[in-house]
């Protein structure tokens, strides 16, 4: 019985933690999809649709209250259209999770 109780104290909190794959945000930008939509609109207006389309897929990561959205550096010429050595950069944007404001927009070289 003690072993069963001990297992419950370990397994229940562990299973609850594993079920929460999305970070909790107390603002309008609660998930990656929303952050991507907001950032993509600004990135396209600054760098153009053709440039941003060439950097798909875009992905976002939440740190604190800021979503960082980055493009993907796709380099032609290797196996499967990709190569290990690649020159260039990607578009990026920072989006406030609190109010959806664009905090910064840049593009690497």
Image (spheres, rainbow, N blue to C red):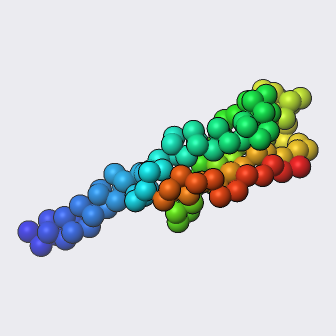
- Residue under the point 31% across and 61% down: 14
State whether residue 72 appears in this view: no
Toward the viewer: 55 or 9? Answer: 55
Toward the viewer: 72 or 82? Answer: 72
- Residue under the point 81% across and 49% down: 107
- Residue under the point 44% across and 51% down: 28
Toward the viewer: 6 or 32? Answer: 32
Q: x, y (%) of residue 43?
A: 71, 41
Quarter of the view holding residue 54: top right
State whether residue 9 appears in this view: yes
Left or right, residue 10 beside residue 104: left
Q: How many marks?
A: 0
Quadrant location of the N terminus in the rendered image = bottom left
Q: x, y (%) of residue 53?
A: 73, 30
Up-down relation of residue 95 to residue 53 (above or below): below
Up-down relation of residue 56 to residue 22 (above or below): above
Up-down relation of residue 33 to residue 20 (above or below): above
Q: x, y (%) of residue 8?
A: 19, 64
Q: x, y (%) of residue 87?
A: 91, 44
- Residue under the point 29% across and 57% down: 16
Left or right, residue 56 beside residue 77: left
Quarter of the view holding residue 51: top right
Quarter of the view holding residue 91: top right
């Amino acid at each position: 019985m003690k072993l069963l109780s001990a297992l419950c104290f370990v397994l229940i909190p562990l299973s609850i933690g594993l079920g929460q794959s999305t970070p909790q945000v107390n603002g309008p930008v609660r998930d990656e999809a929303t952050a991507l939509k907001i950032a993509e609109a600004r990135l396209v207006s600054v760098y153009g649709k053709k440039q941003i389309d060439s950097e798909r897929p875009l992905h976002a990561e939440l740190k604190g209250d800021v979503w960082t959205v980055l493009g993907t550096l796709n380099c032609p010429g290797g196996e499967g259209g990709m190569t290990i050595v690649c020159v260039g950069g990607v578009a990026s944007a920072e989006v406030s999770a609190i109010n959806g404001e664009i905090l910064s927009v840049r593009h690497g070289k």
